[in-house]
Amino acid sequence: MDTIRRGSKGADVRRCQKILVEDGYDVSIDGDFGYGTEVAVKDFQKKSGLTADGIVGTNTWNALFTVESAFTPQEPLPPILQKAKDEGYEIWNEPYRLWLFGLRSKDSQANSFNDTLGCYYYSPEGGWVSYFWPGTTDPGTYWLENPSRVAGTAILVEEQYLDTWTIDLHAGKYEALCQRAGEVSVYRDGNKDNVLDENPDTITTGYFGINIHKAGSDSTQVDKWSAGCQVFKRLADFNKMMKLAHMQQDNTGLKTFSYTLMRE
């Protein structure tokens, strides 16, 4: 995509405007980058942790693309939902109810954002809306080497957790999806190296504060960002997920959120 700014015209401007409208901005999709589009771009950049200069270059395009959703018909099921169904997990097509998921990488080496976090929901117009974001489903090296519990650092067990998270303050600082409404199961990795150990003999179940939250604006390593939480690599992606969470709450009245963690 080309760099665009106030005064630009054409297909790239139209696509930018379309994504902004999808993200809730009141701009015209006319292919003309005017004052209104510039104001919306600056606000979007500010919320995404970018320099708010109104110029849509590489970083802003990347952030915009995390807003743009994919849409697939009702049948057949998207592959990830079919995989979940085949594994015996629940899926649903209630409009606006989020089906949040994590796909854990096969790589057992810790400290990289090499997993996928994502969301499906069923549109009231019919069909699935989907989002895919980079993140981690594992703890970072810091907490593996410096566990806060004698038994070891938590690694969330691959499973479906129904109605387990609510919108609350993560660490008392900002809104996230926090484990307030149900128990989860975790492995305890206690050998203090940077290899993720999933020993079934160490599994415990309870309330461990396994929240779904953000790292920095665009973090490169997990480090201290996760002690077992499910963590978004990019701020813009996390902000979009939280908008979707409020969308579910506002449109369905359902204040709890489910999450399904599977191996990629």
Image (cartoon, rainbow, N blue to C red):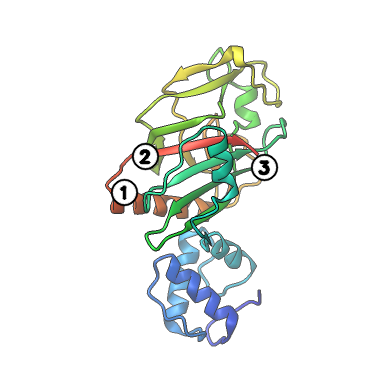
* Residues at marks 2 and 3, CA–CA distance in whole angstroms: 26 Å
- Reading the image, the residue beneath label 3 is 114
Q: Residues within 10 Å of mark 1 (few under 14, many from 20)?
A: some
Determine the secondary structure under disc 1.
Answer: helix
Amino acid type for the residue under numbered disc 2: Leu
Amino acid type for the residue under numbered disc 1: Gln
- Left or right of 161? Residue 105 is right
Residue 39 position, x and y percent, is 43, 75
Q: Nearer the viewer, mark 1 or mark 3?
A: 1
The answer to whether residue 225 is visible is: no
Determine the secondary structure under disc 2.
Answer: strand
Kindly identify which numbered label has been placed on residue 169. 2
Q: Indicate which disc, 1 or 3, sits on the residue closer to the N terminus.
A: 3
- Left or right of 152? Residue 120 is left
Q: Indicate which disc, 2 or 3, sits on the residue closer to the N terminus.
A: 3
Residue 20 position, x and y percent, is 46, 70
Kindly identify which numbered label has been placed on residue 131. none
Is 10 drawn above or below residue 127 in the view shown?
A: below
Determine the secondary structure under disc 3.
Answer: loop
**In the rendered image, which quarter contains the N terminus?**
bottom right
Residue 113 position, x and y percent, is 64, 42
The answer to whether residue 97 is visible is: yes
* Residues at marks 1 and 3, CA–CA distance in whole angstroms: 29 Å
Is 4 drawn above or below residue 216 in the view shown?
A: below
- Reading the image, the residue beneath label 1 is 249
